[in-house]
Amino acid sequence: MSDMTKQTKATINVGDVTTDMAVVHGSVGPSVIDIRKLYGETGMFTYDPGFTSTASCESKITYIDGDEGVLLYRGYPIEQLAEKSDFMETCYLLLNGELPDAGQKTQFVKDITYHTMVHEQISFLYRGFRRDAHPMAVMVGVVGALSAFYHDSTDIQDPHQRMIASYRMIAKMPTIAAMAYKYSIGQPFLYPLNELGYSANFLRMTFGVPCEEYKVDPVIARAFDRILILHADHEQNASTSTVRLAGSSGANPFACIAAGIACLWGPAHGGANEAALNMLTEIGTVDRIPEYVRKAKDKNDPFRLMGFGHRVYKNYDPRAKVMQQTCHEVLDLLGKRNEPLLQVAMELEKIALHDEYFIEKKLYPNVDFYSGIILKALGFPTDMFTVIFSLARTVGWIAQWQEMIADPLQKIGRPRQLYTGYGPRDYIDISKR
């Protein structure tokens, strides 16, 4: 634990055994009881399905206060970063702990830009996938395969190799993601252009074609950049925990990020914005909204409103506030407010923000609700939504992975279990069963 933390004690009584456990205080947020000696002193483990009450690590990267609706990257409020920063600067912050000065940012952007191309043989990998493969399946396979191409950056004990691997993944993820999309629709891959910014480059590689110049609207590029900032990290969520767990075994960084992508694919995690759009499609028209609102309020009805509420935030998701503004800006710019699906989304948003049931249950529209609408308006198919999420989250995963590797207290992840199966029993010969 950090030397900056102050320690007190918590007394735990288990039968006739009384033991003191250190209480460790972070810089902000809840304190934790250090139970590493619990089994040795009491013969018992703790039982915490989903690890909802367990801190698995010490971190200085991201802080969430779900009750107050607070999200900080390295201490900076997400609202300020989304308004004043850009994604490259936010990446530097997450990786290095401080905002860059002008010279540091210029060098960082240059370093990332000149790593955006992928090894030419990687393009052959895509031919092994069916054209109708889900882009996330492609992402898992291709990112995992990077370790087969970049042998010079897989030694996790070498800080320089760790840095090179980190830069490569941040830089190449938009290229790999755009290639996944292009492959699915049968269009040729586009190489990145060094003159374009991070978001503009991805938009061009995704929607451009070789036969004509593709001009990126700066407002759209800025909106997409904001989406990336808001999704860049989110503390010890399922995919980040997966990256750390994979990394704890000493696995190479490319394999660890591929594991994170696989976890993010789940509909309860990164697939939530895709699920939200599918729900809007199911509702179909504005006149059907009251029917679905009634279904959502009915405890006996299995229907759930996707894109509302959050496991951590018991207040309005701070990312959703920024995303809401961005959503309306994009819809106005593109003139798409009258599209049926988006009309359903806007009307549902209005109901959720004013209906007493939603307010009482704190079922506010979350970041997935708004990001799905924006991405749909920009022309992305729903199966690309989670791919874009993984593109944004890569820098957070890498920052967390780097922090874990450098942590002297890091051990291979090995959760315990509450065993409820058979006790010892003798083998019965097959003829007697």
Image (tube, grey):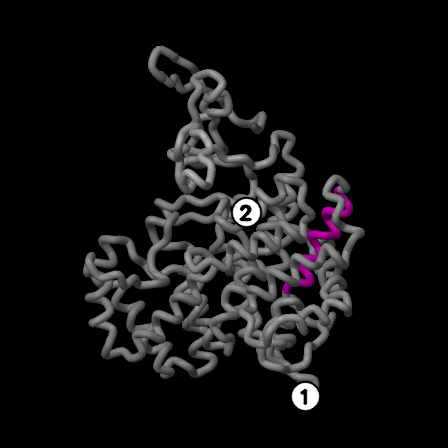
Instruction: Give the residue type that dot 2 points to.
Output: Thr
Q: Is residue 170 magenta?
A: yes
**Residue depicted at x 67% and y 53%:** 254
Q: Quadrant of residue 228?
A: bottom right
Q: Quadrant of residue 221?
A: bottom right
Assign the N terminus to one quadrant of the image.
top right
In depth, the one of 257 and 355 nearer the eye is: 257
In the rendered image, the vertical position of residue 142 relative to residue 185, given as above or below: above
In depth, the one of 15 and 83 nearer the eye is: 15
Q: Pointer 2: residues within 10 angstroms few (<14), some, or many (20+)?
A: many
Assign the C terminus to one quadrant of the image.
top left
**Residue depicted at x 68% and y 71%:** 196
Q: Is residue 110 visible?
A: yes
**Name of the residue lying farthest toward the top:** 16
Please tell me whether mark 2 sits on a helix, a strand or a loop: helix
Determine which residue is flagged by label 1: 212
Q: Could you tell me residue 47's position as x and y percent?
A: 39, 32
Residues rendered magenta in the picture: 159-173
Determine which residue is flagged by label 2: 242
Q: Is residue 356 visible?
A: no
